[in-house]
Amino acid sequence: MSLPPWHPSPNFGPRRDGLRPALIVIHYTAMDSARAALDRLCDPGAQVSAHYLVGADGAVCQMVEEAARAWHAGAGEWAGKGDINSRSIGI
C-alpha cells in the first residue's frame, strides 16, 4: 500500500524562539509497515511525529508543515544546542 502525499499529524507545535531548520534528522521506525508508522506518527496519544515519512516503495508522505515543529527529536541536543525539534526537519 502506497502512502498518501499528505496525512496531517496532530502532534506538532510552533517552532520556538523564531528558530529555523538547519538540521535534518533521519529516523528508523522499526515498524512492520509504512502504514503502521504513519498510524503511530499521527496518533495523538503517542505524542510523536515527523515532517515526512518515506515508505519502502519510495513514496513520501508529509505529516507536518516545514514551518512547524514536529515532535521527533525528544530532548535531543546537537553541538551544544538543545530543542532539536525547533532546529530540524524530521524524516
Image (cartoon, rainbow, N blue to C red):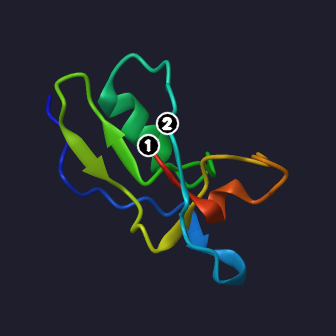
* Residue closest to the eye, 19 or 85: 19
- Classify 79 as above or below 86: above
* x then y, percent, for residue 11: 55, 60
* x then y, percent, for residue 91: 44, 43
* Residue closest to the eye, 76 or 80: 80
* Residue closest to the eye, 54 or 33: 54
**Mark count:** 2
**Residue drawn at (63%, 52%), measured in percent from left and top?**
47
Numbered circle sitting on residue 51: none
The answer to which image quadrant residue 63 occupies is: bottom left
- Classify 31 as above or below 12: above
- Identify the mark nearer the N-term, 2 or 1: 2
Q: In 3D space, how far apart are the residues under numbered discs 2 and 1 (Cα atoms)?
A: 5 Å
Numbered circle sitting on residue 26: 2
* Residue closest to the eye, 49 or 87: 87
Q: What element carries label 1?
A: loop
* x then y, percent, for residue 32: 39, 16
Q: What element carries label 2?
A: loop
Residue type (three-letter) at the residue carrying disc 1: Ile
Classify residue 27 as left or right of residue 3. Answer: right
Classify residue 79 as left or right of residue 53. Answer: right
Residue that protrudes farthest toward the front in the picture: 79
**Residue drawn at (37%, 48%), measured in percent from left and top?**
52
Mark 2 and mark 1 in contact? Answer it, CB < 8 Å: yes
**Residue drawn at (59%, 72%), measured in percent from left and top?**
13
Residue type (three-letter) at the residue carrying disc 2: Ile
Label 2 crowding class (10 Å Cα cut-off): few <14, some 14-19, many 20+?
some
* x then y, percent, for residue 46: 61, 45
Which quadrant, please, contains the N terminus?
top left
Q: Name the residue under label 1.
A: 91
